Image (tube, rainbow, N blue to C red):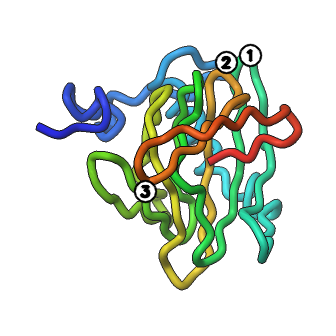
Amino acid sequence: MNSDSDLQIAGDILAVQHLLQPAKEHPSTVAEFAGLARSIAADRALWAPLVAYDATTRWYRRLRTGPGYEVWLLSWLPGQGTGPHDHGRSSGYFTVLEGELTERTEGGVRTLAGGAQGAPGRVVTPGRVHELVNDSLEPAVSLHLYFPGLTDMPMHDTAGVIHSFAPSARSVVPA
């Protein structure tokens, strides 16, 4: 079985609604971080007025920080993407709020669509290489949570070679 996450091997508990934990102010487990991200995603009045678009690059804004984590809001115009990368030592969780994004991993290609109920989120483990792209003809908005906060985003080429990228805290572009 070709799998790109431990959750796919064990079964994705995040997809089973009754197993989800309520959002905690200061989460400490994957399920709690997912709960926090889902609660923020559900609060459209919080994030929708903040969304902006940039024709030259993905737009991003940090929404929240807590003990060892940060939450980012990103917008994507058609054709904008990350390139293959990992998140260094950070774990992550992301979900699409509006539009759709394509995620490419070693395990395959997945399209994630936002909407009234929100897309199912994706867990990203440290060192896992993936790429996100807006392959659609409409803008997209996504929410990303990182623990610990994102300090390193090594870029990879299509052959899997790492191109070191260690941005300062002010220049980190989440994905």
> Few, some or many C-alpha atoms within 10 Å of disc 3 (few <14, some 14-19, many ≥20)?
many
Q: Secondary structure at mark 1?
A: loop
**Residue that mark 1 sits on:** 67
Q: Residue at x 43, y 43 (%)?
A: 160
Rendered position, 40 above or below 139: above
Decide which of tag 3 and tag 2 comes sooner along the chain: 2
**Residue that mark 3 sits on:** 103
Q: Which mark is residue 57?
A: none
Rendered position, 89 above or below 124: above
**Residue that mark 2 sits on:** 26
Rendered position, 139 above or below 114: below
Q: Tell me the distance, in whole angstroms, between the alpha carbons under discs 3 and 2.
A: 28 Å
**Circles 1, 2 touching at the beta carbon (< 8 Å):** yes
Residue type beneath disc 1: Pro
Decide which of tag 1 and tag 2 comes sooner along the chain: 2
**Circles 3, 1 touching at the beta carbon (< 8 Å):** no
